[in-house]
Image (cartoon, grey):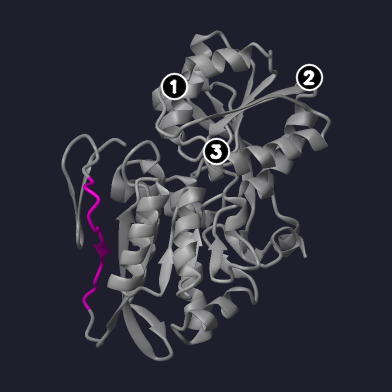
Amino acid sequence: MRDGLDWRRGRIVRIGSGLAVAGILIAFTSIPSTSEAADTLKIGVLGPLSGAAAPWGIALSRGAELRAEELNAAGGLKIAGKAYILKTIPYDHKATAAEAATTTNKLVFEDKVKFIVGNAVGATCDAAQAITEREKVLFTFVCWGTKNVAADKPYSFRELLSQWEVSPPLYAWIREKHPKIRRVALISPNDTSGWDTSTAVKDAAKELGMEVVADEYYERGAKDFYPLLTKILAKKPDLLELAGSTPGEGGLILKQAYELGYRGGKAWVAAFDPTRYIQIAGKEATEGLWTVGAPDLEGTYVSPGVKEFARKYRGKYGEPATMIAVANYAGMDVVTKAMQMAGSLDPDKVLQALVKGKFETVWGPVVIGGKARYGIDRQFLYPFVISEIRDGKTVDISSVAPKELKK
C-alpha cells in the first residue's frame, strides 16, 4: 500500500509508510448531522489487515465504510420508519483461521453484531462460519472456499464471483483466442482457498482439452519461489496460472518466473489488485497477464456505478479502487436494501428478502443464485470483465454476463 494506516475506533490517521495494525479492534464511524433520533446499527467486517493479504482486508473495510458514510450522510438507514446510523467494526484476522475464530467471537459476543459484511481467505471463512451459522448471524464475504457456500450454511452469502463462476468463461476465451496454449501449470497457496481455486481452474482447463502439467502449492507468506518455479518450468507449460495467490505473493511469483526466463502465457483468476502486483513484479513480468478480477474500474467495460465508485474511492484514499472494494461496497448496499425490503433487522427475514429478486447496484443488476452448483441460492451474480495487463496497465478486452441475468 502507498500509505500506512493507524487504525483506531472511529477514525483513520495516516502515519507514513507501512501498515500499523496490532490486532486491536478497529472501526470506522460516519455519523451525519441530523435532527432525527437514530439508533446505531453495528456491522462487522472481517479481513486480513496485515501481511501479504492486507490489500484484500483494507479494500473490504473501505468498501463497507464508503457505503455506510453515504447512508449516514442521507440521515441514516431507514427501516420500518426508523433511522439507523451505521457503524462498521472491522477486525484484522491476519489471514489465519485461528485469529478469524477469535475476531468473529468478538464481533458476535462482545460487539453483539447480527450482520458481518466482508471477509477474505477461504480458511478464515470456514472458521468464522462455525460461529455465524450457529448464532444465526448473516455473513457476506468474498472468500472462494468451495464449501463456504452450501445448503447447510443458509446465513452465508458470497458477494464476489468465485473461481467456479469465472474460470470456465476465462479459459474458454483463452482456448478460443490462443489455441496454441495447451499445457497449463498452476501455483497456489496451500490452504482451502488455494486448493479450491486450483480445482476450479483445472476442471475448466481439462473440460476444454487442455493438459495440466503441474499443480504446485506453497505456504502463505512465502517469498522465495525460485525452487518451486524451477520445478514447474521444467514441465514446459504454455500457461502459468497463479490461481488463489495474494497480490504480494503473486507479484513475487511473476517477478521470479520472469527472472527464470519464463515468457509464456500467464493467467490469474484471483488477481484483484493490479497496482500492488505490478509494483512488485514490474511491467515486463506482468505483460500479457490475463485476469478477471482487475478490470479498469474507470474504463468503458464497467457500469457507470462502478466508475463513480472508483472516482470516489480514489478521491478519498488517494489510490485506485479494486474489485474487492467494489464487491464489499455492493455487499453493504445489497444487505441494507434487503433490510429495508424486509422492514426488519432480523437476519432470518433479511436473508429471505435477499433471495427474492434483482438488486440495482454499482455492478448493475445483481441476483442471488448458484443453486445448481451449491444446492442453495447464496452467490451474488453480476456482469464481469476479462482483462489483460499491457505496459503496466489494465486493458479490458471482453465482458461476460452470468446466464441468470439474461432471463
Dot 3: what SS? loop
Dot 2: what SS? loop
Front position among marks 2 and 3 = 3
Which of pointers 1 and 3 lies earlier in the amino acid sequence? 3
Q: Which mark is residue 281?
A: 1
Q: Residue 244 carries which label?
A: 3
Task: Using the numbered discs, state the Cα–Cα distance from disc 2 to disc 1 in whole angstroms.
Answer: 26 Å
- Vertically, is 244 above or below 344? above
**In the foreground, 44 or 86:** 44
The amino acid type of the residue labelled 2 equals Lys
The residue most toward the bottom is 81
Determine the residue positioned at 48% across, 15% down: 226
State yes or no: discs 2 and 1 in contact (Cβ < 8 Å): no
- The residue segment tinted magenta is 21-33
Task: Using the numbered discs, state the Cα–Cα distance from disc 1 to disc 3 in whole angstroms.
Answer: 17 Å
Determine the residue positioned at 31% across, 65% down: 106
- Residue 344: horizontal and vertical position, in percent? 46, 86
| Rendered-image quadrant of the C terminus | bottom right
Which of pointers 2 and 1 lies earlier in the amino acid sequence? 2
- Vertically, is 130 above or below 284? below
Q: From the viewer's perspective, tell me whether residue 55 is left or right of residue 246.
A: left
Q: Is residue 27 magenta?
A: yes
The amino acid type of the residue labelled 3 equals Gly
Identify residue for label 2: 180
Which of pointers 2 and 3 lies earlier in the amino acid sequence? 2
**In the foreground, 7 or 188:** 188
- Residue 49: horizontal and vertical position, in percent? 32, 46
Determine the residue positioned at 48% across, 79% down: 347
